[in-house]
Amino acid sequence: MILELWMVGVVIAVLLFIRVPVGLAFIGPSLWYALADGRSEGFALKTTFDGLNSFPLLAVPLFILVGVLANRLGIADRLYEFCLAALGRLRGNLAYVNVGSAVGFSWMSGSALADVAGLGKMQIPAMIKAGYPAGFAAGLTASSSLISPVMPPSIPAVIYAATATVSTGALFAASVLPAFAMAAGLCLYILIWTMRRPQFGSVPFDRSRFTRASVNAVGPLLTPVILLGGILSGTFTPTEAAAVAVLYMLILGVIYRSATLRVLLQALRETAVITAGITLILGAAALLGLILTRAHVSRDVAEFLTSVSDNPWVFMILVNVILLILGCLIDATAVILVTVPVLLPIAMDLGIDPIYFGVVMIINLMIGLLTPPVGSVLYITSSVTGKPVDVIFRGVAPFLIPLIAVLILVTALPGLVLWLPGLLGF
């Protein structure tokens, strides 16, 4: 059976290499192994569905719908215009607007793909028209989109919390400062980049434009107050908050007169497609995770890692390296579902807080969205710009420096992660 388990790993790797969807690449070999181990098809089916039978996971399609509605109903456009009016007087203003609008949109989305697909259509052409290199514009847009899956409401955080059985609210609170640190790191890079390029100037502050944009952005800017305020105060569970946020998006759409039946049907269709892909991965990873557990993979990995060192810092360095590699090769959702049951018990035995561990894991895996061969953000950015993926990656590469620097900072300073949850009583 050990040999057969290795064969499962090899087959999964081959299927991923030839770009078979992650869910299918997991479920086929896992089903074969389960049957070879004397398990029935009913056992495999029950395990797969048990992996989906989780109330916290109900928040995932709802948060996806929030992000899709924000794009479809023109709410993201209002945030972009507000950032443009507020940050126009900065040198390299469109670059800062790119990051600022990504931060604003992150409070509604939770998905990097929704961010780059929605805001990228505005940000990249505007920057290219203003004279910014196409690679820089695409690379910054792709990189700033990573703020969305780190800043609450983060879809990866919901999945991690359900897998690790930790408080989603605590994980949301812990993610706020690291997400702002990512934005600050990107802004620092922009500052250094624009210092050597004085041609990217600023525009005078227009008070009337700012006032008008502020009024138009009041509704969208209240979204994090309702959503995050409700979760962090204990008024809503994350799933309830997601449902309230969907309702609030619909109310804004009615007020702005953009919530037509056609737009709503398109939003529901897009949400269903994205949710179906995630659901397939969740179910397949549940079956694969049970197989790894029965084969005592967790024990073997624990023995290997602790044989290297029982120092928590050495362990976190090893985990960062492992997750950065896995994030380049496999979808983040699948990595969370498969590795959390293996790595988290080891981390907790070493005295590492599971909330801190989750934030580090999420940042690691989100960086993988910018790196080939998987790099789904690269492909979305490529489709938005019409540029080849290799051109997009060359534009992204410099921005990996501040993002990895933030990852190192968050790993080295657990207090940066745990301060806000402690302040809020989680």
Image: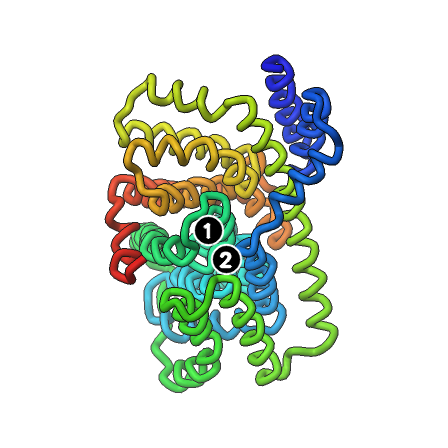
Task: Note whether residue 197 is visible.
Answer: no
The quadrant of the picture occupied by the C terminus is bottom left
Residue drawn at the location 66% of the way across and 47% of the way down: 277
Dots 2 and 1: beta carbons under 8 Å?
yes
Identify the amino acid type marked 2: Gly
Indicate left or right for 106 with 273 as reference. Answer: left
Type of the residue with mark 1: Ala
What label sits on residue 402 in the rendered view?
none
Q: Is mark 1 on a helix, strand or loop?
A: helix
Q: Residue at x 30, y 38 (%)?
A: 352
Q: Is residue 44 above or below residue 127?
A: above
Q: Which residue is drawn at 63% across and 34% down?
A: 287
In this picture, is 10 found above or below 193? Answer: above
Residue, disc 2: 110
Instruction: Determine the CA span between mark 2 and mark 1.
Output: 9 Å
Q: Is residue 183 above or below residue 406?
A: below
Image coordinates for residue 50, horizontal then vertical, percent? 63, 44
Q: Position of residue 63 (x, y in %)?
A: 55, 61
Residue annotated with mark 1? 157
